Image (tube, rainbow, N blue to C red):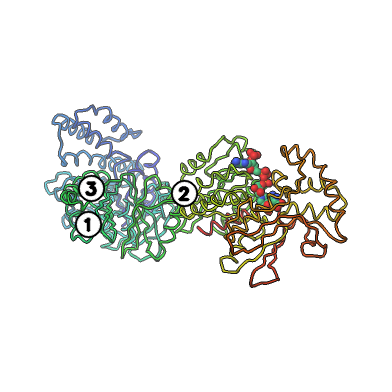
Amino acid sequence: MKILKFGGKSLANGKGIHKVVDIIEDKAKSGEVLAVVLSARGKSTDELEEILEKAVNNESYQEQLTAFKKYQLAEYVNFNADIEFETLDKLFEGVSLLGDYSKRIKDQVLSQGEVISAKLLTHLLQERGVNANFTDSRALIKTDATFGEAQPLEKLSKENVVNHFKKYNGDTVNIVTGFIASNTKNETTTLGRNGSNYTAALLANYLDAEELQNFTHVNGIYTANPDLVADAKKIEKLSFTEANELAYFGANILHAKTIIPLIEKDIPLRILNTFDHNDNGTLITSEASKKGIKSLSVLENVSLINLEGRGLLGKVGVDARIFKALAYKNISVSIISQGSSERGIGLVVASEKANEAKKVLEQEFEVDFQTKDVNTITVEDEVSVISIIGQDLSTFHRPYNALIKNQVIPLLFNNTVSGNNVSLVVYKKQLHKALNVIHGEIFGVTKKINIAIFGHGLVGGTLINQILESAEKIKKRKKIDLNVFAVANSRKVLLNPKGVDANWQSNINEGIAYSIQDIIDFANQYHLENLIAVDNTASKEFTDNYLKLVENGFDIVSSNKIANTLSFDFYKDLRSKLEQYQKQYLYETNVGAGLPLIDTIKLLHLSGENITRIKGVFSGSLSYLFNTFSKEDRLFSEVLREAMDKGFTEPDPREDLCGNDVGRKLLILARELDLSNEFVDINIHNLIPENLRGGDASSFLNKIEELNPVYQKIKDEQQPNHVLRYIGDLHGDLFEEKGILDVTLVSVPESSALGQVKGSDSIFEIYTESYGDQPIVIQGAGAGAAVTARGVFGDILRLTEKG
Ligand SMILES: NC(=O)C1=CN([C@@H]2O[C@H](COP(=O)(O)OP(=O)(O)OC[C@H]3O[C@@H](n4cnc5c(N)ncnc54)[C@H](OP(=O)(O)O)[C@@H]3O)[C@@H](O)[C@H]2O)C=CC1
Ligand SMILES: N[C@@H](CC=O)C(=O)O
C-alpha cells in the first residue's frame, strides 16, 4: 500500500484540487492500493485561528466566517458542509459569549478544516466514480489529552488503523483527515506542528506501507530555497539522517516527528509536486548517501542573545545556569557558541521568546551584574541562521572566505562534531546575499560575478562586447557567470540586475544620472555578490570613488593609470584599505596594455630577484608615431592623427605627447619595486613645444601642423641609419627609497633592439642581478582598444579565480 499526503497549498484552489483528484483517480485506476491523508485547504487553519481570536475578544467575526464558508464550498454546488459549519457557528458563539476558550475548544475548531477538506475530496472522487471513503482519523488515532500537541497512544491507534483498513480495503480509497485525533474520552485533539505529515507517517508505519508520497507545491528538497537562490538544484536522494538535520534547521516537511515512524519500519518517503507530479521528486531512504554537502537551510524568526562578562572566565556552571533558567520558562536554545575564554556566550532562541529570555537571564545573573562579572545581555533580532548540511570543517574555508570577500561577516558560527553541519548567524539583511554566495561556492553551480563598468569608450566599449561574446562559453567551461549589471559614463548609468545585453549601446541613452552611492545601493538592493568595478575612464575624478567601492565590497580592475600615480600616500592608503576589506585591485593594462608586464615584474620582485633597471619604449602610440615617422616620408601630424584613429593614444593625445603617459607607466613600475617616487620626481622630455601647451585638446588639434617643422628638423639632424624612439628608463639604485625615472626622446641605430621595434609595439627590457647584461625582454602590441580590453578581461577572470 502507498500512503499519499497532500498539503494545504495543493488544496488551496480549484486548480490544485483538480490536480489532486486527477492524481488519486489515476493511481486508483491503475490498481494501486491507496490511503490518502489531507491537510485543511490553503490557509484554513490560520483563518479559523483568527476567527477564534476575534470571537474571544468579542470582535465581529461573522464576515470572516461567512468568507471562510464561501471559500470552502467554492463552485462545488453538490458539496454539503452544513454539519461542520453548524459546529463552527456554535463553537464561535460560545467562545464569544464566554470571552474565553480552552485548548480543547481550539482543537475542536481547528479540526473542522481537515474534516471539510477530506469530505470535499471524497465527494469529488465519488463523482468521478472512485470508491472513496471519508475516514475521520479521530476514530482511528487515539492520543493522550494534551490538546494542541497530543501524543498518540501507539497500541490502540495501530489496532484501530489496522482494523479499519482490513474492513475498507481492495479498491477503496480511504480519504483520511490529517492533523486531528481524539483522546480516550473521544474528545478531539490535534497533533501539533506538522500534524498532517505525522498522521501520514503513523498510517504508513501501522500499515507497513511500501512508500509515503508527500505531495507539496515544489518538486522536492532543494540545495537551497529556490525563492532565495535562483540556482538551487533539486536533490534526488537523501538519507533519513540528512533529512533529519534539514528538518532541525527549518525544512518543516521533514520534521523528526514525521520521520521517526518511517525510520522504524524503513519506509521510503518521497517528496513530490502536485503540480508537476511526473517529476520523481526527492526520495528519502535509510540508505546512506554519498558524503558531501547536501543543502543550505535557513532558520528565520530567531534572535541572537549575547551574554558578556569579564568575570565569567573560568567560572564553573555558567552554561548550566543559562540553560536551567531558560528551560524553566520553556525557552529552547537552538544554537549556542562560547568563546574559549568564556567571556561571551551567544545563544539563538525563537524571536517571540527573546525578550523573555533576556529578562530571565538578567534575573539569573542579577548578582553577577552587581559584582561586574557580567556586563551586558543584549538581544539582536534582525538575524537569520544559515545551516550548511553536510559541511565539515575541512572545507569550510571556501564558503567562509567567499562570505568575507563579499563582506558578509557572520555574527557567530557553530559546528556539530558528528553531524557534519555548520551553522552561521548572519544579519537578516544579508541573508539573501549570504545564501547565494555560499551556494555558488559549495555547489560549484555557476558562480555569478557582478560587474559594473565605468567608461564605455574605446576600451570600455570593446570590453563589454568581448564579455557579452564570451559569456556563454565561460559559463560552460568555467562555471562562471559574468553579469554586467551596470555600464556608466561620466553622466549616466544603465542598470540591470540581470545584466545588460548586446543593445547596451543604444539603451545607454535611457540611462539615468547617478552617483557612486546609487550603484552601491543598487547592488545591495538586488543582493548582488562577487562585485567588480572596472575603471575604463581616464578620469582622476573617478578614482576618488575607489576607497568607497572597496569599503562596499567591490574588487577593482582598472585600465586607468591615474589611481596608481597619485600621491604615494594615496597609493598606500588604497592598499591598506584593500587589505582591510580583503579586496583585490588589478591593473595589468596600466603598462604595456595587454602585455603581461606587471605580473612578471611583481613575480620577479616577490621571488627576490633584484631588478636593477627597466628600460624601453613604453608608449604604443608614440612607438607607432616615431616608428612610422622615422621610416616613411610623411608629415608628423598626419601620422599622429593616424595613431589617434587607431585608438592608440590617450583620450586626450596631449597626455601621450607631453610624456605624462610614459611617466605614469614608469612610476607604476617603480612603485611595484617598492620605490616611493612621486610623479614630480620624473624627468620628462615634453614633446609639445611650449607655445602649443596652453588651451584645450581641440585647440591643440587645430594646431598640430605646427609640430611638423619641429620634428622634421629633429629627424633630419640624426646620424645616418638612426631612428627616433621615445623611451622610459627606470634606473639608479633601485634598492634605495627612490629610483631615477627618465622619459626622453632618443635617436638610436636602426639595427639596435630599440631601433627594430615596429608598428605600435612596446618593448620592455628588464635587467636583473641574476640575468646580468642580458635583459628579460617583453615585446608586443603596447596599445589598442582590443588588446587592452582583452587585458582588462584577463584581470576580471583572474579575480574570479582568486574568489
Ligand atoms: N587605448 C589604449 O591602448 C590603452 C588605454 N588605456 C587606458 O584606458 C582608459 C580608457 O581609454 P579609452 O577607452 O581610450 O577612453 P575613451 O575616451 O574612449 O573613453 C572614456 C570613457 O570614460 C568615461 N568617463 C570619463 N570620465 C568618467 C567619470 N568620471 N565617470 C564615469 N565615466 C567616465 C567616458 O564617458 P563620457 O563620454 O561621459 O566622458 C567614456 O565613456 C584610459 O585610462 C587609458 O589610459 C590603457 C592601456 C592602453
Ligand atoms: N596611450 C597609451 C595607451 C596605453 O596605455 C599608449 O600609447 O601606450
Could you say which disc has been placed on residue 230 in the image? Answer: 2
Disc with the residue nearer the chain's start (2 vs 1): 2
Q: Secondary structure at mark 2?
A: loop
| Residue 635 in the image, given as x and y percentages of width and height | 85, 47
Q: Badge 2: how crowded within 10 Å, few (<14), some, or many (20+)?
A: few
> Mark 3: is the Cβ under 8 angstroms from ligand 1?
no
Taking the image as shown, residue 765 lies to the left or right of residue 47, namely right
Residue type at mark 3 is Gly
Q: Nearer the viewer, residue 385 or 120?
A: 385
Q: Which residue is mark 3?
A: 192
Foreground disc of the pair 2, 3 = 2
Viewer can see residue 540: yes
Which residue is at the far left? 185
Give the quarter of the image for residue 787: bottom right
Q: Secondary structure at mark 3?
A: loop
Q: Secondary structure at mark 1?
A: helix
Q: Distance of mark 1 from mark 3, alpha carbons?
A: 39 Å
Taking the image as shown, residue 133 lies to the left or right of residue 445, namely left
Could you say which disc has been placed on residue 312 in the image? Answer: 1
Q: Nearer the viewer, residue 721 or 172?
A: 721
The residue under the point 35% across, 33% down is 75
Could you say which disc has been placed on residue 120 in the image? Answer: none
Disc with the residue nearer the chain's start (1 vs 3): 3
